[in-house]
Image: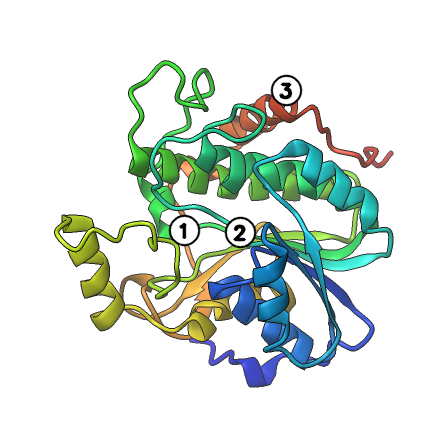
């Protein structure tokens, strides 16, 4: 098993990294580690006040810019504003089991933010990306089912966890198809994915009802099973800098992939379905109006 740790990160001087959702949790820990190794890190955040507060805790060159992944106009504006080459894009931001909500463009909030927002952002930035695209998924993807005819829960009764699992499965299918397309285009960019295991982040902060079963469950896993944000960020960092193949998936190597040093891990059979990945890509292009920008190599 690998013993990869923050101390093993290579020098990142001269490289630019964009991290979405970098104002808290795993995103903040990822950005802090990369900035400390010399990278110029762009914190792509919805709330600039929180982003600047996070940046104040970091050493190195850190730039805070607004990005709302639940708004395609904001995604386009961000992509137009980032004109310098990007070495690594970390698609980290995400929502977990909120009440039913809609993005500015009418997408169900979890698929819209976790998948479609990052899908649009990646393709808009791809001509300027030089090394890697890392997308953060979850072990929850194993419960996921992609409904291409109702990605946005307009026909089905909304259920928060199945919607979350669908979005996390979409992250892995997106990574697989992005890897295939980059290979076909003879691009040097690698597409990888990671999951943090049981990390005590703020994803469930909206579940504050002391009487709720979910709140009690969250408290139990946070105090007994989960690892810190810094440890939860290790699989993302591993996927971003380690010598791993394109299309790979990193996660904790400990018990049930809940915690421990990162390694390459498996994924569900559905997440390995190439036909489904291509169909989801086509549907995502239809919904976002954003397409793969690189030409196929001849």
Q: Residues within 10 Å of mark 3 (few under 14, many from 20)?
A: few
Distance CA(mark 2)–CA(mark 1):
12 Å
Upstream in sequence: badge 2 or badge 3: 2
Which element carries disc 2, helix, strand or loop? loop
Disc number for residue 286: 3
Q: Is residue 177 visible?
A: no
* Numbered marks: total: 3
Q: Earlier in the sequence, mark 2 or mark 1?
A: 2
Residue in view at x 64 percent, y 40 percent: 178
Q: On screen, 30 above or below 163?
A: below
The image shows residue 47 at horizontal and vertical percentages of: 59, 53
Name the one closer to the observer, 209 or 9. 209
Do residues under tags 2 and 3 come within 8 Å of each other at their CB atoms? no
- The residue at the point 56 percent across, 37 percent down is 70
| C-alpha distance separating marks 2 and 3 | 22 Å
- Label 3 and label 1: CA atoms lie apart by 25 Å
Please report whichever mark, 3 or 1, sits nearer to the chain's N-terminal start.
1
- The numbered disc on residue 138 is 1
Residue in the picture at 47% in, 74% down? 230
Q: Quadrant of residue 271?
A: top left
Q: Which residue is mark 2?
A: 93
Residue at point 45%, 28% (across, down)? 108
SS assignment at label 1:
loop
Screen quadrant of the N terminus = bottom left
């Amino acid at each position: 098993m690998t013993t990869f740790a923050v101390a093993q990160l290579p020098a990142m001087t001269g490289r630019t990294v964009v991290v979405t959702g970098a104002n808290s949790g795993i995103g903040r820990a990822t950005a802090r580690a990369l900035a400390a190794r010399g990278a110029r890190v762009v914190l792509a955040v919805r709330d600039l006040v929180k982003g600047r507060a996070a940046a104040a805790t970091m050493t190195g060159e850190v730039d805070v810019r607004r990005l709302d992944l639940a708004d395609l106009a904001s995604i386009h504006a961000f992509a137009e504003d980032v004109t310098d080459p990007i070495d690594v894009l970390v698609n980290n931001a995400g929502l977990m089991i909120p009440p039913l909500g809609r993005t500015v463009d009418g997408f169900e909030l979890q698929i819209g933010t976790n998948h479609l927002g990052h899908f649009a952002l990646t393709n808009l930035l791809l001509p300027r990306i030089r090394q890697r695209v890392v997308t953060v998924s979850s072990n929850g993807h194993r419960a996921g089912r992609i409904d291409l005819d109702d990605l946005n829960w307009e026909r089905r009764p909304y259920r928060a966890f199945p919607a979350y699992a669908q979005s996390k499965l979409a992250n892995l299918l997106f990574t697989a198809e992005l890897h295939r397309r980059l290979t076909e285009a003879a691009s040097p960019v690698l597409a990888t994915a990671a999951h943090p295991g049981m990390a005590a982040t703020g994803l469930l902060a909206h579940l504050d009802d002391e009487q709720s079963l979910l709140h009690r469950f969250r408290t139990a896993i946070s105090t007994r099973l989960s690892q810190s944000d810094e440890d939860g960020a290790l699989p993302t960092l591993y996927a971003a800098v380690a010598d791993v193949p394109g299309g790979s998936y990193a996660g904790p190597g400990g018990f049930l992939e809940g915690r421990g040093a990162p390694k390459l891990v498996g994924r569900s059979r559905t997440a390995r379905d190439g036909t489904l990945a291509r169909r989801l890509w086509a549907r995502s292009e239809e919904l976002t109006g954003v397409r793969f920008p690189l030409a196929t190599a001849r």
